[in-house]
Image: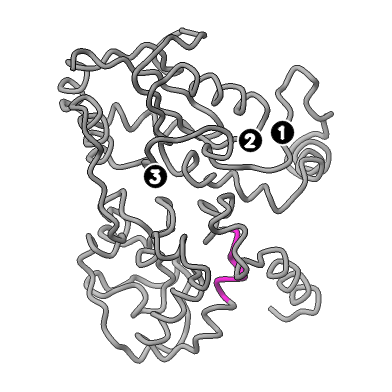
Amino acid sequence: MGEVTVNTEWLSDCSGCHVAIVDLHEKILNVLAAVKIQRCPVLTDVKDYPKARVGLVSGAIRNVHDREAALKMRESCDIVIAWGSCAVFGGPAGAGNIHTPEEIATAVYLENKTTTPAPPPSRQVSPLESKVTPLDTVIYVDFYLPGCPPHPLFVFEALSALVEGREPETAKRSVCAKCKRKMEKTEVAELKSNFEGIPDPERCFLSQGYTCLGSVTIDRCLAPCPSNGVPCTGCAGATMQVLTEPNRDIRTEIAERMSRLTRIDREEIVRSLERSAKSHYSYTMATSMIGEKPTFLIKRWIEDEEADYEAGGR
């Protein structure tokens, strides 16, 4: 089908998804042989949006600039890919939805204990929107490639598929599918923080009382964290079962599995996950599939935690 033209855009994210292209190493030569990158904020100084076959958009919609850039990408590209967890789900910036833009500006610029108080940004800076949202709340998205960033294997497959004129192959498995650890029933009776002790390298983290989100996270990483002694934090986003079924929830799914594998009470696990909800839901709370679930009550969980703290309940 000839050379494929590509535009990329970088909205509210950390740049990791753009760096993932470099992580293709020698495979990038196969891609570049059939792809012409026209616009890429980290590689070119092109400011406009030339007509392109494929558009890769990373980052969430956080401010007015993001919205305008997303619309320009949709107008200029035949195919748009939401590239990375921020574009697909809203990403860590979604934690800002718990607060108003005014509260955030006050905390960052006026009441920040680590910096000298400064006035909020002037009108020269694109203002924050009322809430953080995924890319598809603003434009139509043709394909989704979550991950933080997506593993180079999935990046290469997606780009290769588009060059070849086919739909990318995607698996619906969880991170656990690529994890070598064994789920075993144990006599563990207490929850552990990730910095406590040295986990058994052969046994599932849940069996040892450590919170690991691998079983509720879609695999777009090939499980490098649990394979190297680090519990999964859910950076690729929730599995389709959690996203699409109203009564399935990250905290209850994890609590159900861990309580069956250990002697830890299910409700104790649920409460622990609620206390750390900003961390455990950080990648997905901005998407309506999580943030608008009847089971997602993060503001109440935060209020309960603050009340316990004030009462000395910790």
Our reading of the magenta stretch's main secondary structure is helix
Indicate yes or no whether the magenta region holds residue 44.
no
User: Circle 3: is it few (<14), some (14-19), or many (20+) Cα within 10 Å?
Assistant: many
**Residue 62 got which mark?**
2
**Residue 146 got which mark?**
3
Q: CA distance from mark 3 to mark 1?
A: 24 Å
Q: Residue at x 18, y 27 (%)?
A: 164
Look at the numbered discs 2 and 1 and tell me whether their residues touch, using CB distance below 8 Å. yes
Amino acid type indicated by mark 2: Arg
Q: CA distance from mark 2 to mark 1?
A: 6 Å
Q: What range is drawn magenta here? A: 272-278
Residue pointed to by mark 1:
128
Q: Secondary structure at mark 2?
A: strand
Look at the numbered discs 3 and 2 and tell me whether their residues touch, using CB distance below 8 Å. no
Which residue occupies the foreground of this view, 171 or 267? 171
Look at the numbered discs 3 and 1 and tell me whether their residues touch, using CB distance below 8 Å. no
Amino acid type indicated by mark 1: Leu
User: Circle 1: is it few (<14), some (14-19), or many (20+) Cα within 10 Å?
Assistant: some
Up-down: is 268 above or below 294? below
Which residue occupies the foreground of this view, 93 or 243? 243
